[in-house]
Amino acid sequence: MKLRTIIAFGLATAAVAGLVSAQTGMKKITIAAFPSLDEAVKIALPGLKKKYPNYDIELTALQYGDHHQALTTALATGQGLHDIEAVEIGFVGKFAEGGGLEDLNKAPYNGKSFQRLFVDYTVAQATSSDGRFIGMPADIGPGTTFYRKDILDKAGISSTELTTWEGYIAAGKKIQAKDKKVFLINSAASAAGLIWRSNIPSGEGIFFSKDNKVIVGPDSARWVKAFTIAKQIRDAKLDAKIGEWSNEWYEGFKGGTVATQFSGAWLQGHFQNWMAPDTKGLWRVQDLPDGAYAPWGGSFYTIPNASKNKPEAWNVIKYLTTDRAQQIASFRGNGAFPALKSAWADSSFNEPVEFLGGQKARLLWKAAANRIKPLDVNKYDSVAETIVTTQLTAVLDEGKDIKAALTEARAEIEKRARR
């Protein structure tokens, strides 16, 4: 189901974004975002109104896929762009290497002077191969393992058993032996996604090397492992075969039929605020299996070349991303882990997280964030991920040979990247 939300504050309604109302002196600034980044903007609205009382800020929110599709179309046509466009990490490489967005390193933005404030790897994600910096980081997603402590306790499992892939799969079998209605994970593909995005050498990408060569293939230990672990989970019937961001996914968490989930730290806020609030106190978190450290999501604010209100848009973006109090407020209210490093010194990081049974989870996530290496991004990342996911589905659902699938994936990615 599509989500569309429009929220505005200010006193004027301009017929065209960017025009100053002669009657009120208000200037309309439009922001396009997606859940749950839109919640962070909502949290910031009172502060923005106080700091910039002559800004009439209008927020439009679409579901993740719809938002990025609309942005892709708008950049291609030059029509329908907002003053500020949010971009998620899965698309930032594509937009960084393309055109239509302001280089925030240039005057009057001088974004390079702000980059030291953020986590290194998130700055790299928003920087193109020719050095253009197209997005200010809003939040990051240090990867973590969420697990239902009550389900593990019932099956006589210690969380330490989840720290290796061998132990993780063995734990799933114990859970199934205790209750056939409870699955280890929503989809085996989630485990594959974790492996192929983790422990990548600094400067390399998920799908492409520094010199733009495709690194997906049967000769890559990382990719073979990703597909192999996923197949082992599927063959053992340990996954519920449900996709993320589906109603079945939500119901699995609400009903206690999914025992673990790999995700970014931000998932805790989703659980707490709307996805499964009644499971408060049942969840815990720990580091990913096999000592993996991986970025899992992250959001950026960009300014389209077509914006008529670039100075004002830049003021809003600076407030959303570099104001420490605002970043902390978003973290407390929405679970969005700050990209701004100075926010990590806030006392909230030492506080027990009530939803997670009083666990001091933020310290774990902060340590994980510090160990994630900068990744290279490529404009074909989203294309490559679609191709790889299609081949993984063939392995899981049709029994396709893993090496054959990876060979075909590499060939298709190379073909698409040459176009």
Image (tube, helix red, strand yellow):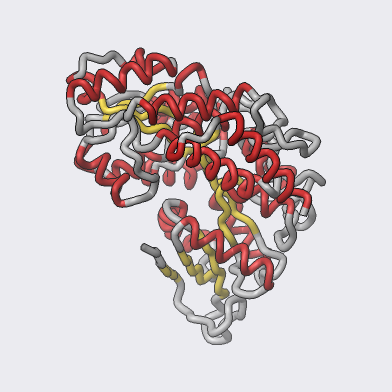
Q: Is residue 278 above or below residue 358?
A: below
Locate residue 328, reporting x and y percent.
45, 41
Q: Quadrant of the C terminus?
A: bottom right
Q: Nearer the viewer, residue 200 or 168?
A: 168
- Give the residue at x 61% y 76%: 18
Locate residue 418, reporting x and y percent.
78, 50
- Direction from residue 91 to residue 188 in the image, left or right: left
Q: Nearer the viewer, residue 139 or 388?
A: 388
Locate residue 98, reporting x and y percent.
73, 56
Q: Is residue 320 above or below residue 213?
A: below
Residue 295 falls in image quadrant: top right
- Direction from residue 333 to residue 314 in the image, left or right: right
- Give the residue at x 79% y 56%: 107
> Can residue 334 be seen in the rendering of this structure?
yes
Residue 178 falls in image quadrant: top left
> Can residue 264 be seen in the rendering of this structure?
no
- Give the residue at x 72% y 30%: 203
- Give the residue at x 17% y 20%: 154
Locate residue 400, reporting x and y percent.
51, 35
- Direction from residue 219 to residue 385 in the image, left or right: left
Q: Nearer the viewer, residue 365 or 150?
A: 150
Q: Is residue 180 above or below residue 74?
A: above
